[in-house]
Image (tube, rainbow, N blue to C red):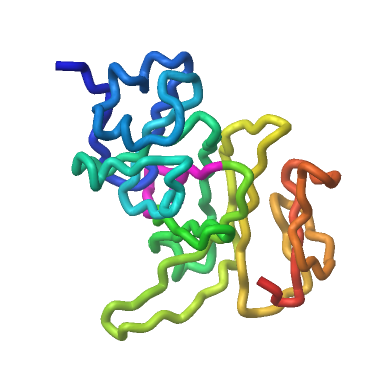
């Protein structure tokens, strides 16, 4: 019987195994039914195996990832080496009503989402892993099962911290949408420039620095 270098995942964003030299995730270690479903090459550096629990970010991405849940009953995702992942953490979120709620991370390009739960072990906040070169909308799970309704609560303060390092060819955008119009926001201690952006600048084409922030007051999605 071939060895299987796979784990069973228990919660969202639990971890990522990154094959750095092609020996971890290849035809000799990955179950045949999973390997046959992959449209990308195995046994190459950069392939990843990670948790797919409560994680819909990879739905509709057969050319990028294969979900093992349907094939093997394991809540894992095998992804090709062309996808780059980075971890982000969020805490210091206010107001207090949001403190212990889960958050949704929604890919604005694909409209797919993943949930991350609050944990005191994550510096009293959240940690999540996302593919790079995407814009993610962060919003809190304010659904009330007793009233079967949800009332949106705008975050007045958050902190994004401990991001994994990115190279010059990668980026991650985090978007927060608010019902109330504000004059400006402070991001990482710096005030945003008050401009009506209808499109987020492309960091590959424009002079965008790490930590830059943009505010769209026109309420254009």
* Image x and y of residue 156, in percent: 60, 67
Asked if residue 196 shows in the view, the reply is yes
Asked if residue 126 shows in the view, the reply is no
Per the image, is 55 magenta? no
Residue at horizontal 41%, vertical 53%?
Answer: 59
Residue at horizontal 64%, vertical 51%?
Answer: 173
Quarter in which the C terminus is drawn: bottom right
The image quadrant that residue 35 belongs to is top left
The image quadrant that residue 200 belongs to is bottom right
Q: Which residues are magenta?
A: 117-131
State the count of labels. 0
Residue at horizontal 51%, vertical 75%?
Answer: 153
* 87 lies left or right of 143: right
Q: Is residue 102 above or below residue 19?
A: below
* Image x and y of residue 71, in percent: 23, 42
Quarter in which the N terminus is drawn: top left
Residue at horizontal 59%, vertical 42%?
Answer: 132
Q: Nearer the viewer, residue 84 or 141?
A: 84
* Image x and y of residue 16, in percent: 40, 32
């Amino acid at each position: 019987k071939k060895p299987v270098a796979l784990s069973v995942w228990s919660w969202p964003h639990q971890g990522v195994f990154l094959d750095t030299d092609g020996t971890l995730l290849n035809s000799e270690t990955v179950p045949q039914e999973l390997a046959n479903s992959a449209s990308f090459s195995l046994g190459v550096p950069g392939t990843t195996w990670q948790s797919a629990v409560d994680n819909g970010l990879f739905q509709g991405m057969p050319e990028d990832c294969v979900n093992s849940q349907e094939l093997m009953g394991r809540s894992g995702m095998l992804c090709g080496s062309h996808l780059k992942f980075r971890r982000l953490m969020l805490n210091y979120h206010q107001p207090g009503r949001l403190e212990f709620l889960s958050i949704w991370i929604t890919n604005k390009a694909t409209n797919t989402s993943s949930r991350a739960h609050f944990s005191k072990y994550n510096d009293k906040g959240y940690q999540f892993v996302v593919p790079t070169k995407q814009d993610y909308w962060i919003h809190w799970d304010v659904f009330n099962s007793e009233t079967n309704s949800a009332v949106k609560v705008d975050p007045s303060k958050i902190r994004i911290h401990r991001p994994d390092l990115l190279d010059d060819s990668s980026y991650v955008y985090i978007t927060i949408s608010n019902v109330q119009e504000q004059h400006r926001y402070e991001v990482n201690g710096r005030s945003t420039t008050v401009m009506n952006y209808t499109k987020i600048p492309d960091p590959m084409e424009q002079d965008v620095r790490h930590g830059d922030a943009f505010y769209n007051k026109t309420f254009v999605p």
